């Protein structure tokens, strides 16, 4: 049995600056795993997977539409959840063995309002429980709903009153994480964040994933959903991260 946590942690593919930002600011934008010449194919695979998804796998919220389980929707998405810089971020921030909890498509629909600032997981006595990633299938801009973050908020000991009650308005010192298509946001699930308003006429597409402590309960039971064709092509590292 490989000691994957040590192997991943030895990596060195996440820069010291990025680790510093993750620790201090709570998020960082890095180049993603898909080369620029592969982005059109990725976007086409995204659209096709979303169009073919059954209604059971669709989550339609007030501003976004999610399609669950992008582990099993095509080989185009395989490299996203084994991307070494994100796995290294998990080693540095979660600081214990981890697994993939979910990987889904999330489309922010045109003319949608901002999402309330929130955390995905609160810090607990054992530290930070989650690292998330957001792959920008489209460019993230300030007019199409790029994700905003409140820098350093993962370290707050006390939550300010104005955040406790669904803060949709712009927040003091918030930073909007813009980037070219193909960029990836890596963030601490305990930092306050949310998408901004999409005032454009186009959807803003993304693929989002979360890694959590190995013994924690996953958002989606990925092992139970594995398709034979996915199992046949993925690597031992992928199997480890899926906990199968
Ligand atoms: O889609 C986004 O920009 C934000 C997503 C988000 O807030 C979340 O997944 O918790």
Image (cartoon, rainbow, N blue to C red):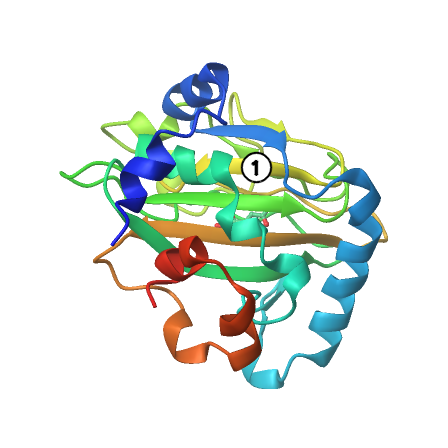
Q: Is residue 140 left or right of residue 235?
A: right
Snapshot quadrant of residue 26: top left
Instruction: Establish if 54 lies above or below 153.
Output: below
Quadrant where the N terminus sits is bottom left
Q: Is residue 241 left or right of residue 69?
A: left
Instruction: Establish if 38 lies above or below 63.
Output: above
Where is residue 102 shown, x and y percent of the image?
A: 45, 61
Is the CB atom of the residue marked by disc 1 within 8 angstroms of ligand 1's nearest atom? yes
Name which residue lies at 49% across and 72% down. Answer: 231
Quadrant where the C terminus sits is bottom left
Where is residue 237 shown, x and y percent of the image?
A: 42, 53
Snapshot quadrant of residue 88: top left
Q: Check disc 1 and report the residue beneath it.
A: 185
Where is residue 212 shown, x and y percent of the image?
A: 32, 51
For numbered disc 1, what is the local secondary structure? Answer: strand
Closest to the observer: 124 or 142? Answer: 124
| Residue 160 visible in rendering | no
Instruction: Establish if 188 lies above or below 130.
Output: above
Question: Neighbour class for label 1 at 10 Å: few (<14), some, many (≥20)?
Answer: many
Closest to the observer: 167 or 89? Answer: 89
Where is residue 153 shown, x and y percent of the image?
A: 37, 28
Instruction: Establish if 36 lies above or below 23.
Output: below
Closest to the observer: 235 or 110? Answer: 235
Q: Is residue 34 left or right of residue 148?
A: right
| Residue 56 visible in rendering | yes
């Amino acid at each position: 049995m490989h000691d994957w946590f040590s192997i991943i942690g030895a990596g060195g593919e996440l820069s010291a600056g990025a680790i510093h930002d993750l620790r201090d600011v709570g998020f960082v934008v890095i180049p993603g795993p898909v080369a620029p010449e592969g982005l059109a194919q990725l976007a086409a695979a995204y659209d096709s997977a979303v169009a073919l998804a059954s209604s059971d796998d669709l989550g339609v919220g007030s501003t976004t539409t999610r399609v669950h389980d992008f582990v099993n929707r095509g080989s185009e998405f395989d490299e996203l959840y084994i991307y070494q810089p994100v796995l290294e971020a998990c080693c540095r921030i979660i600081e214990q063995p981890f697994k993939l909890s979910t990987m889904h498509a999330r489309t922010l629909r045109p003319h949608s309002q901002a999402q309330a600032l929130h955390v995905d997981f609160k810090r607990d006595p054992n530290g930070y429980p989650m690292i998330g990633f957001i792959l920008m299938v489209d460019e993230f801009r300030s007019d199409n709903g790029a994700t905003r973050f409140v820098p350093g908020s993962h370290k707050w000991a006390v939550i300010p009153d104005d955040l406790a009650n669904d803060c949709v308005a712009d927040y003091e010192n918030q930073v909007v994480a813009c980037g070219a298509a193909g960029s990836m946001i890596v963030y601490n699930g305990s930092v306050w964040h949310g998408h901004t308003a999409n005032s454009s006429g186009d959807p803003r597409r993304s693929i989002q994933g979360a890694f959590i402590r190995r013994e924690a309960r996953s958002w989606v039971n990925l092992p139970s959903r594995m398709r034979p064709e996915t199992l046949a092509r993925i690597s031992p590292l992928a199997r480890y991260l899926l906990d199968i």
